[in-house]
Structures are given as structure tokens and as C-alpha cells.
Image (tube, rainbow, N blue to C red):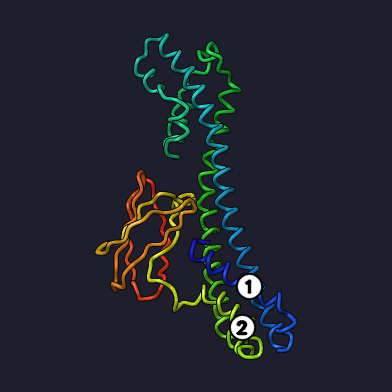
Amino acid sequence: MNANQMARYKAYALSLAHLKQNEAITATVPAFATIYESAKATLDALESADKRKAQKLKGIAEDKSQYQEDLALQANAIAAAIGAYALQQKDAELKQAMNFTVSELFYGPNKELTAKSANILAKAQELVEPLKDYGVSELLISNFAAALDAYAGRMHKPRNVTAERKVAVMQIAELLKQLQVIFTGQLDALMLLFQFTHPEFYNEYKAKRSLVNPARRKTRVEGVVTDKATGAALTQVSVTLKDGDSTGSTAQDGSYSLPAKPLGMATVVYEKEGYKPVEATLPIRRGQAEVMDIEMEPK
């Protein structure tokens, strides 16, 4: 959940906890139990959807990193052997082609690691016999080829994970809407029955509910920014509202919340080093939190 969604979730949770702690009071109205259980089930489903979203992001990052490091280390070792062979053969072009570090391989773009590894593998397969003198066996080349295949396979996985994450994001938004309907359409109305008979109970509930009352929201734009390929949250993305005086950046979880003036249609610009800038247009309405989730592509 983004920052605003989490705030709403916590407010709903606090409101339900308040009702649960005062069952002796709510039990006097038979309809309360059914509506409470409906709200609690929806809240639990919301928490589950958020956990699935977080697990997808964590899982894909760990999975990719493991295979990326394995491939980069093997590529560097074989490239070093080919470089030594090229030096002995006085092949300056081949020596230069093999001249890079593990860091360059590991921290470079996915496509670059795949392309360089493929070139190293092709050259190693051409030089199977002479490379034996430099400690590169056929088994080592075979293992390197397998590592390249495994890494390439993982590059397709992020698309599937991103799709699953999007489903979770949509579920979170939908479940929050359902909770709002339950609270505003049912629980809030029932609570009016206790306004005079149990004023402290009613006022405490009202105080917790005010945290998710749309009329009390400040005018702003908010959302989450992620990497389009992996679905990973992007931190330190510059977010600027054009024709306005608001600017900010995304937090560690990729979320942002930008104060805005009711301008009608407005354009928000998202920028981060290494990524293509994104512009998004949306309506800015007074007292509303306009949600805009953004995916950014590496350059």
C-alpha cells in the first residue's frame, strides 16, 4: 500500500478494534455483528493483498540478484582467461573486448550483462582447446552456458511477477473502496444510535473515522513509482507538478504525496537518473487525493 492507503487501512483497523473492544455496547444492536464481520473480512483480505504485493517485490529482487551475481562472476573469470590468451597472442582487439570488471557486469543493465556474457561464451566455445592451458575446461564453459540460460530465463519472470503485482495493487484499491462503502453506508449510520446513549464510545469512534473521511483530505497527488520491467519500487524519483509550486521525491517504498492546488487538469513530471522521464496528466480537485501510480523505463 502507498502512504495514503496505509493511513486509511490503519484508521479502518483502529475503528474496528474500537468496536471489538466495546462488544458489550454494540451487541445491543443485532445488525452490528454481521456488518462488523463483513468489514473485518474485507480488512483481512486487504492486508493479505498487501503482503502478496510485498512478497512479489522482495522475491523477484532476491531471485534476480542471485542469478545475476553467479553469471557475472563466471563471465568475468572466463573473460580474464580469454584476455590472457589474447595478450599472449598479441591480439589487442580481443584483449580490449574482454577488458571489464565484475562490477561493470553486475551493476550494468540486464541486456548488457546478457549480451556481454553471450559474446564471452561464443569466444570461449571457439577457443576450447587453447583455453585449457588457462584453466578453462569444457565443463567450465558448459556451466557458464547454463548460467547464461538460467539468467536469461529469469529476465522473463519479472513480467509475470509485475502482472501479479498489478493484480494485487488493483485488489488493494478495490478492497479499500469496499471498506469505505461498509463504513459510510452501514457502520456510520448504526453508530448514530449511540450518539446520546454512549457519547464517549461514539465520539472515540468518530475521532478514528475522521482519519478516513474524504471531506477532510487535503488536495494532493499521490501514488507509487516502480520499475516497469521488474515492478521494484523506485526511491528518490523527482516528482514535480507543472504550473504549480509543488515538488518532492519518492520514499523508500516508491510512494509519494505531493500537495496541490485545485488547478483542473494538471501535468506531473517524474524524473530519475538512468530512467526515461514520464509526464502524466490528471484532474486536480479540491479536497481530493488523486492517485497516480507510475512505471518508469530504464534509458
Residue lying at the far front of the rendered structure: 200
Residue lying at the far left of the rendered structure: 243
Kind of element beneath mark 1: helix
Q: Amino acid at mark 1?
A: Thr
Mark 2 is surrounded, within 10 Å at the Cα level, by few (under 14), some (14 to 19) or many (20 or more) other residues, namely some
The disc, 2 or 1, on the residue closer to the chain's N-terminal end is 1
Residue under the point 56% across and 33% down: 147
39 on left or right of 207 = right
Q: x%, y% of residue 134?
A: 53, 13
Residue closest to the eye, 86 or 181: 181
How many marks overall?
A: 2
Residue 5 vs 150, above or below: the answer is below
Mark 1 is surrounded, within 10 Å at the Cα level, by few (under 14), some (14 to 19) or many (20 or more) other residues, namely some
240 on left or right of 6 = left
Residue closest to the eye, 187 or 141: 187
**Label for residue 202?**
2
Residue 299 shows in this picture? no
- Between disc 2 and disc 1, the foreground one is 2
Q: x%, y% of residue 129?
A: 53, 14
Residue under the point 39% across and 75% down: 287
Residue 161 vs 274, above or below: the answer is below
Residue at label 1?
42
Residue under the point 61% across and 74% down: 15
Give the CA distance from mark 2 to mark 1.
23 Å
- Locate the C terminus and report the quarter of the image it occupies: top left
- Which quadrant of the figure has residue 22? bottom right
